[in-house]
């Protein structure tokens, strides 16, 4: 898995029809298509802020993106 910039991750997500989401009742974030009732869609600005505050980064592996602690 390779780390990618947040801007690159956003572009990839948009091309796949994904939006930023927060798991309801937690501070967990992930990419979503917006169809899961347990995940609320948030703004890209809130997504960026959460990544920064929690010291998280987006990693890519062959088109699959995962959010993890920065290495």
Image (cartoon, grey):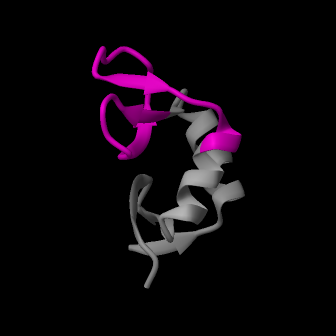
Q: Residue furthest front?
A: 25
Which quadrant of the figure has residue 27? top left
Q: Quadrant of the N terminus?
A: bottom left
- Which residue occupies the foreground of this view, 1 or 19? 19
Q: Residue furthest bottom?
A: 71
Residue 40 part of the magenta-drawn span: yes
Residue 2 part of the magenta-drawn span: no
Is residue 30 toward the left or the right of residue 53 in the image?
left
Q: Residue drawn at (44%, 53%), measured in percent from left and top?
A: 63
Q: Is residue 45 above or below residue 58?
A: above
Q: Quadrant of the C terminus?
A: bottom left
Q: Is residue 9 above or below residue 39?
A: below
Q: Residue drawn at (64%, 46%), measured in percent from left and top?
A: 10
Is residue 71 toward the left or the right of residue 19 in the image?
left
Is residue 10 toward the left or the right of residue 58 in the image?
right
Q: Position of residue 34 (x, y in %)?
A: 44, 19
- Which residue occupies the foreground of this view, 24 or 35? 24
Q: Position of residue 53 (x, y in %)?
A: 56, 63
Q: Which residues are magenta?
A: 21-46
Q: Position of residue 38 (x, y in %)?
A: 28, 22
Q: Residue drawn at (66%, 39%), measured in percent from left and top?
A: 44
Q: How many marks?
A: 0
């Amino acid at each position: 898995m390779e780390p990618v910039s947040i801007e690159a991750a956003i572009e990839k997500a948009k091309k796949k029809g994904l939006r930023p989401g927060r798991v309801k009742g937690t501070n967990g974030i992930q990419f979503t298509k917006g169809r899961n009732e347990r995940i609320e869609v948030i703004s890209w600005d809130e997504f960026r802020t959460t990544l920064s505050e929690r010291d998280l980064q987006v990693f890519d592996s062959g088109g699959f993106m995962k959010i993890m602690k920065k290495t």
